[in-house]
Amino acid sequence: MRIILAEDSALLREGLVRLLTEAGHQVISQVATAPDLLAAVATDLPDLVVTDVRMPPDFRDDGLRAAVELRGQHPGLPVLVLSAYVEQAYARDLFADGMGAVGYLLKDRVSDLGTFSDAIDRVAAGGTVIDPEVVSQLLVKPQSSPLEHLTPRERQVLSLIAQGLSNQALCNELYLSEGAVEKHISSIFAKLGLPTDTAANRRVLAVLAWLEQA
């Protein structure tokens, strides 16, 4: 997989390049600023972008804004954003287009090569990944939230969907039949009021509906 990496910390950037290379990927460009990320993608479109949230020039959410801009220029471009801490608004911005192929992962997960590699593969394949810590914080919702109408099992299913699990992975994780999983997912879609005639990824829309209640 051809990857462009954006991270302003030279030490972490070198570590990420090593991890990605050892996992069999090719880092075609590594940059330290958001403008350089935009330029790198314009020069050579990658299979995946991995970027930090806080980067030069403003050291705010420059990396995130660059990722959103790139998704606007190249719809469906797989992007995995890394953050030092949980910020639900960042995840909402990433998932706003409802197209999938996006991930939001805490940097602490990077040290777990299995988790990091799995997130990369899922995002590159068009799936979605939200850090489990973000998911756990989103489980607590106000009473006015549509999520109030979900059963405990449906909330569990939605939390695993948010982490990027496929239907088959849900079956294995919850020890449920494929039919039971599909029934839970259909019920979640209905309770969240997701349209049945949309061309968008309904799994992504379900996660986005959840994020919007944060």
Image: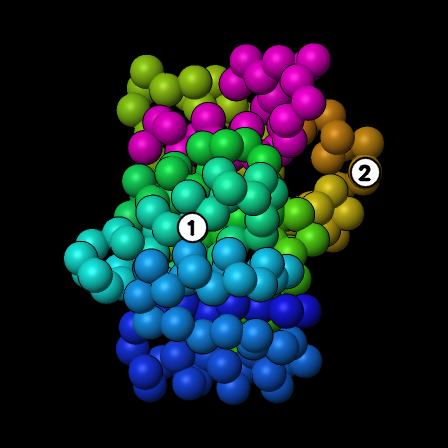
Q: Amino acid at mark 2?
A: Glu
Residue 67's tag is 1
The x and y percentages for residue 140 are: 33, 35
> Which quadrant of the view contains residue 30?
bottom left
- Taking the magenta stretch, the answer to whether it contains residue 188 is yes
Q: Is residue 164 left or right of residue 65?
A: right
Residue 178's tag is 2
Q: Is residue 54 left or right of residue 125?
A: left
User: Which residue is located at x 39 percent, y 37 percent?
Assistant: 92
> Which quadrant of the view contains residue 194?
top right
The x and y percentages for residue 82 are: 39, 61
SS for callout 1: helix
Q: Amino acid at mark 1?
A: Ala
User: Which residue is located at x 70 percent, y 46 percent?
Assistant: 166
Mark 1 Cα shell of 10 Å, populated few (<14), some (14-19), many (≥20) = many
* Boundaries of the magenta span: 187-214
- Residue nearest the observer in this picture, 69 or 115: 69
